[in-house]
Image (spheres, helix red, strand yellow):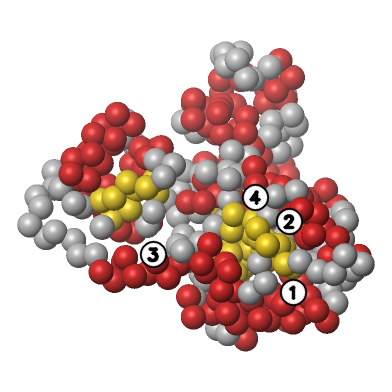
Amino acid sequence: MTENELFYMLALQKVKGVGDISAKKLLRHFGSAQSIFEAAKKNKIDLPEIGTFMLQGIKNFDDWPRVEEEIKYIAKMHLQVVSIFDDDYPTKLFHAPDGPILYFQQGNFNINQSKVISIVGTRNITPYGKRMVAEIVEGLAEHKPLIISGLAYGVDVEAHLNALKHNLPTIGVLGHGFNRIYPSIHKKIAHKMLENGGLISEFWHSDIVDRNNFLKRNRIVAGLSEATVIIESGKKGGSLVTADIANSYNRDVFAVPGRATDIYSLGCNNLIKRNQAALITSATDIIEILQWEVQEKKTTNRQLNLFVDLNEDEQKIFDFLQEKGKTSLDEMAFQLQMPISKTAQNLLNMELNGVVASLAGKMFEII
């Protein structure tokens, strides 16, 4: 991303009244953030979803000095900026309708690996909760998943610590900018995570530490993951918000049950009771439900027919799937800038030739 593109993308992120869903619609329509601001000045934004309030917010945006200050901070801290136009924007997060139009990151990780699990729960973790986090992470370790959490007290930090213990990559999604680590007691852990994992945040260094920001970041925790695991939660709490968001994204949600009298198991028990989460008691349950062993066996037994000749567009699709893994038709068309009808026809030809396999939800992967 050029500095000019970053300048206008950051500005769009801070326009009052324009959320991530509206921003994405505008970006798809105009192709760039700069074009959106130019069109607003000329009153040429004529989209049904964009009302007068949003239009005026874009047109009257005047916080440019703050944008310039943030760009300087990004350069100073050597932050990597990832936008929805970038090839390395997370595939799973791309499918979240309210995912951020851009975010910042530090560390060393592959966000698009196939096995990504979020583990969240109460800040007031009990010995039972600690034991379950440890047992589940240890049980998942042989499959080498990426572990996501929020670097908060309790279940979050236990998830990160156990991932580090088993040499698993782990990412903390922050509810604030990179100018701090909250809670500060987790600074050493955060630094260690940069070696095999890292940190992600959509917030600027000048943003205040606010409870709503921590709730907002939960959609990224859910959106990055194949499944979300809740280990201990009270009747109310941020982890239940994460579970609700994950369900809205049609992702798997798992909950560890507890005794009916345990206040920090009420949330998990209620999720299970209301069929909003699958009951699990071990990592084996997660592995079986997500069919990780079945997928690995299929991958081992499959061989690509090397004698199939691919045309230019089919080769682009093949290279994309080889790099990104399982991907939807819509995302391939968007990322490859290929019409959906043309992408679908090429995928059909490749499927008939035994090169790709079609999966549920218009998803495709290489055979």
The reply to whether discs 1 and 2 touch (Cβ–Cβ < 8 Å) is no
Local SS, label 4: helix
* Type of amino acid under label 4: Ala
> What's the mark number on residue 157?
1
Q: Is residue 211 above or below residue 109?
A: above
3 or 1: tag closer to the N-terminus: 1
Query: What's under tag 1, amino acid-wise?
Result: Val
Q: Nearer the viewer, mark 1 or mark 2?
A: 2
**Residue located beneath label 4 in the image:** 246
For the C terminus, the image quarter is bottom left
Please tell me which residue lies in front, 170 or 87. 170
Q: Earlier in the sequence, mark 1 or mark 2?
A: 1
Picture quadrant where residue 258 is located: bottom right
Q: Secondary structure at mark 2?
A: helix
Which is closer to the viewer, label 4 or label 3?
A: 3
The residue at 25%/51% (across/down) is: 356
Circle 3/circle 1 CB separation < 8 Å: no
Question: Measured from the top left, where is residue 184 in percent x and y?
Answer: 82, 73
Dot 2 amino acid type: Ile
Where in the figure is residue 226, as x and y percent of width and height? Answer: 54, 57
Secondary structure, mark 3, is: helix
- Residue under label 2: 272
- Asked if one can make out residue 195 in the rendered structure from this viewpoint, the answer is no
Q: Position of residue 61 (x, y in %)?
A: 71, 29
Of residues 287 and 199, the one nearer the viewer is: 287
Residue at the (52%, 43%) spot, across then down: 95
How many angstroms separate mark 4 from mark 3 (CA)? 22 Å
Badge 4 or badge 3: first in the primary sequence: 4
C-alpha gap between disc 3 and disc 1: 30 Å
The residue at which mark 3 appears reads as 295
